Structures are given as C-alpha cells and as structure tokens.
Image (cartoon, grey):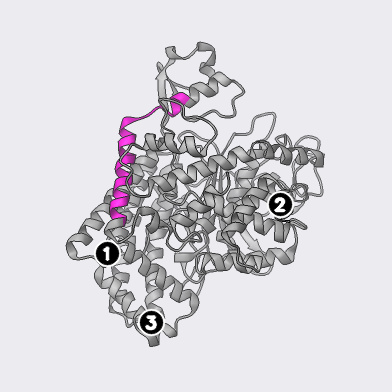
Amino acid sequence: MSACRRMFYLVKHRSLLTYVRRNLTTWSPVGAAFNARPHRKLDLLQKNGLFGVPELSCPAGFQVATETALKNTERLVEKACSSSPGVQTVQCFDQLSDELCKVADLADFIKVAHPDPAFREAAEKTCIEIGTVVEKLNTNVELCKSLKNLLDNPDIEAQLDPDTRRVADLFMFDFEISGIHLDDTLRKEAVALHVKLLDLNNEFLVGSHMPNRIARAAIPEHLHLNFATEGSFIQIGGLHADSPNDLVREIAYRIYLYPNAELMGCLEELLKCRYKLATLVGYESFGHRALKGTMAKTPDQSFRCCVCVQLLGDYITVRAFLQAVVHETEGLLGYIYCDFFHRQDKPHQDCHFTIRGGRQCQETGQYQLPVVVLMLSLPHPTKGAPTLLTPGMMENLFHEMGHAMHSMLGRTRYQHVTGTRCATDFAEVPSILMEYFATDYRVISQFARHYETGKPLPESMVARLCESKKVCGAADTQLQIFYAVLDQIYHSEPQNRSTTEILKDMQQKFYGLPYAPNTAWQLRFSHLIGYGAKYYSYLMSRAVASMVWKQCFIEDPLNREMGERYRREMLAHGGAKEPMLMVEGMLQRRPTIGDFVDALVSELNPNFETFIMDSEG
C-alpha cells in the first residue's frame, strides 16, 4: 500500500435550511447553502470523539486508535498471506489499506488544523508511526508474494474485473517502487530511506510554514500594525501580497523569504534521499518514479507541456457548517466538514483533506461513505457584517469544492482509488474546472446577493472581474511554468549546486522578474512535499479543465446532461481508471500534447486558434 494519500474535504449532518437572513427571498438552493444560519454551534470536539471516533475525545486517544489499527493490520496481513489467490486477495489488501488510512488521514488533518497543541502533537506522532508501518508493509516479501501469486496466474487473473485488476496492479506498483525486488541488504536500505524521508518531509513541511521574525526596531514604527508581534520582535508569516503599501510588501518579501540555514539543509538532504531511493529501486530519477501512472507518464512529457507556453466582496457571505451530501434519488452520498474560518496556529492555506475514503465493505455489504474536510482561512464576521468573500476567496472555495465533489460523487469499489486518490495530474482537473463556474454569471447569479439590500450581483461587475483576471494571466502562467520546471530540475539527476543557485538559474530562464538577493523562495515551496516532481500537474490539469469547460459547459454551465456525463466519465472512477481514458471519455477524443499547449495559450489569448489557422493558411 502506498502511504495514505493526502488531499482535502467535509462532514457531519445539518438540515438544509430554506430561510435566508433579513429580507432576501427566492434564493436558489446554492444561495441558501451559502447564506443559511447554522442551527447550533458546531464543534469537532464532540463527546463521541473527533469525527465520530470514540477514542479521539482526548489526545491520548490517538495512541489507542493507532494500536487498534495496527492490531487489525496484523490480522489482515496474516489473512492476505494465508488465503488462496483471487478477488478476495485484492479485497483484503484494500481493507488493510483502509484500516491504516482511516487513522492516518484523520491524523494528517488534525496535526495541522486542531487548535490544541496536544492534539496536534499526538496526531503527528500517529502519522509518523503509521507511515513507518506502511513503508515496512511495502517491503514485506510474504505479503507481496500473496499478490504476485494472483497476478502471475493467467487463469485467475482473467477472472478479475477491470477495477480489481487495476487496483491489484497499483498495489504491486507500490511494492516495486519500495524495492521489494531487492536483496535483503538493499531492501533494508530502502526501508531506512523511506523512514528518513518521512521525517525530512515532516520537518520541511512544518518549517516551510513557520514565520520569520525580526527586531521591532528594524522596521519603521508606523508599519508595526501590519504584522504580528512577539515581545521585542515582529513575526512575518506571509508575503502580504494584498497590502496596498509597497514598503510593507517589500519588508514581508525580504524577511519571510530570508534563508534559513537549518531548513536549507533539510531540503538539500531531502532531495538527495529521494534521488538515492529512486535509483536504488531502479528509476533514473525521483521524477521518473513519481510520474509513473500519470497522464504525463515521464518527466520529459511534463517538461514539454511546461516550456511550450511561455469587486464582489459585498455580495457573497459564508458561514462555517457541517453538511451531509444528499442526492435526489441515490440518498446520502457522504459528509463534508467546512472548516472555513481563521484561528490562531491554523495554516494560511486553502486545502482539502480526505478523512475517510469510500468503498464497498465486503464485511457488512454496505458502502462506506466518504468523509472530507474543506479547510479555508476566512476572516470572522463582525458585529456590523457577516464574513464577506473577495473574488479570490470565492474562487478558492469553488476550487476546493471541486475536490469535494470528486470524493462525494465517486462510487469506487475500493478505497485505495476513491475520489482524489488518483493520478496527481488528473486530481486537480475537477477543482480547476470549478473555477470556471465561479466566474460565470449564470452560476453566480444563482446565489450572489448584496448582504444588506438583497440586490443581485450586477452582470457588468462579473464581466469586469473576468477581464481583470486576464491582465496578469500571462505572468501567472509564466510563474506556474517556472515553479513546475524548478520542481522537475530539483527531482532530476543531482546538479552539484545549491537549491538557491538552481532557483536563480531557472528564474532567469523561465520567469520575467529577477531573483531578489538573500532570499530563498524554495524554502516556502511546501508543494515539494505532496507534489514532488508533480507540480506541473496544475498546468496539465488546467489544460484539461479548459478543454472540458469549452467543449461541454461554456454554452450552458447548468446543463444536466453534461453534468451527468461529467460524473459518469470523470468523477465516478476515482483512480480506478486510466486518467487519460477518463479525459477521452469526457471529450470523446484523445487530446495530444499540442492540444494541452493550445488550451493553455488560448486561456491567455482567445484568438490564438484563429491566429494559428490564419498563419498556416
């Protein structure tokens, strides 16, 4: 089993509310969901434990939950190794994966989001402990043999349905990239590298979000109010890019990105260990290992895709809530927990977490409903007004909701491939596609009203917003290309130079702004952990989303027939189907690298295709 894959999402029951605040009337269901007042104060720390897990009513419960999961794991490993090869083998593997992921995925969220440091520390210990067990299972020879006996038997293999065969192949791939084929000495070395990488990953991820601080006296006194203070120091935990004061932005940029020698050493060692592990198990580089099974397939293909492409705030309110997702005919689909508001020690990062994956439980005959969390960091409402979303906040909300839809609308047989547990360069397609809906007036008009007057959002305002997004569109795309190329270079063969020297070189070649001396932006590049060698996925997914939007939804974003096709062809399968086949099913054609590039360029210049045709003519 691969280490429990991280993503993002929401939970628990709340009645759908049909009333609205003040004098607003005739809201759509979407509008009601955005503006409804919660029935009661909601709290993760309920008497029955976090997310309904009884043991997790206190920090010590994580150790209890971990021990229970590990006992069940031992039982399932023994069952898998002793059973005759067949479909039940894959089912047992998936149950084993689910047993570990239900604890590890939940802990993965709690370790970054819980307000109580004791809970965060306990969750972090659980992540490390289960991660270590997973890596050992990935090099368990007897466990691997039980799966190999299945795949090596043509008669039994021929009886497997496509989903079961793909999941079996994915489990075998996890064994192979962990070095199961190596001799005892090298296999132990691979395990040691995996364990070391778990620690390095965690150290870098935590460090990349830590604020830097500077003496208060070093900053003009009239600017102190723009930053958090700690005694005689000022803490800077972000770039303050939205500040109207250019001096505040410059101070934040230089201090927040100032090099940290300890974290720099962590990153250098992390990249070395990744390369060493990848080559040890038979790959040219970590990039080659990471991209197997994706749409891009190889670093060369992802690199080609990268280098070919050189007012609303008063109208939308939102509240934190817990939501059961219910289909009109299929009933309850799953739960979404909306952790929307800022609090102390909460990361300033919008993301989605899987708490529990969906799967068909052979033990009970029931479907295990997915549970996800959407985590934002919105400002709290004031006495005079509710929380009001900026255009960027609303777009981020739609983006993360795209991930949640992927989890809720999928109905995979196996949790190993549920929802967003798919190829990384496909996982971002549903979320980016939702960004198009977030800026389409026909969608916005379903819910956006002024919070005081009830007047609908003017269509002209949405039009101006859409036009304004194009102003820096090329620069944004160029920045994404720079990030993607930097990520690929970091995960190629060793460069025999520092990560900062590589950054300076790549920035000069692929980005229009010069490198600022004495800064180390790569130390804030937290995507190097979850998206190592895969940051290009945002560009490739954007290209797919653009093609889907223009071909299927631009004429009518609320078209039910297209929505059903989208669910059937792209969302329903999770990772149980080859990603490019899902794209082909939706577009009813197989896109080429040229199509991907054209899609990205046409986002910046709608007349691009016409220009190409005229030039060729």
Q: Is residue 597 left or right of residue 356?
A: right
- Residue 117, how many percent across, how many down? 38, 38
Q: Is residue 335 left or right of residue 517?
A: right
Q: Residue at x 62, y 40 (%)?
A: 474
Q: Residue at x 26, y 58 (%)?
A: 280
Residue beneath disc 2: 615
Q: Please check the rendered image and state whether residue 580 is part of the magenta-colored stretch, yes or no.
A: no
Identified by mark 3, the residue type is Gly
- Residue 396, how many percent across, how many down? 60, 44
Can you name the residue that lies furthest to the bottom here?
A: 155
Crowding near pointer 1: few (<14 within 10 Å), some, many (20+)?
many
Residue segment shown in magenta: 254-278
- Is the residue 37 above or below the residue 596 in the image? above
Q: Are marks 3 and 1 in contact (CB under 8 Å)?
A: no
Q: Residue at x 77, y 58 (%)?
A: 556
- Residue 201, how many percent across, how many down? 35, 46
First in sequence: mark 3 or mark 1? 3
Q: Are marks 1 and 2 in contact (CB under 8 Å)?
A: no
Residue beneath disc 3: 86
Residue beneath disc 1: 139
Crowding near pointer 2: few (<14 within 10 Å), some, many (20+)?
few
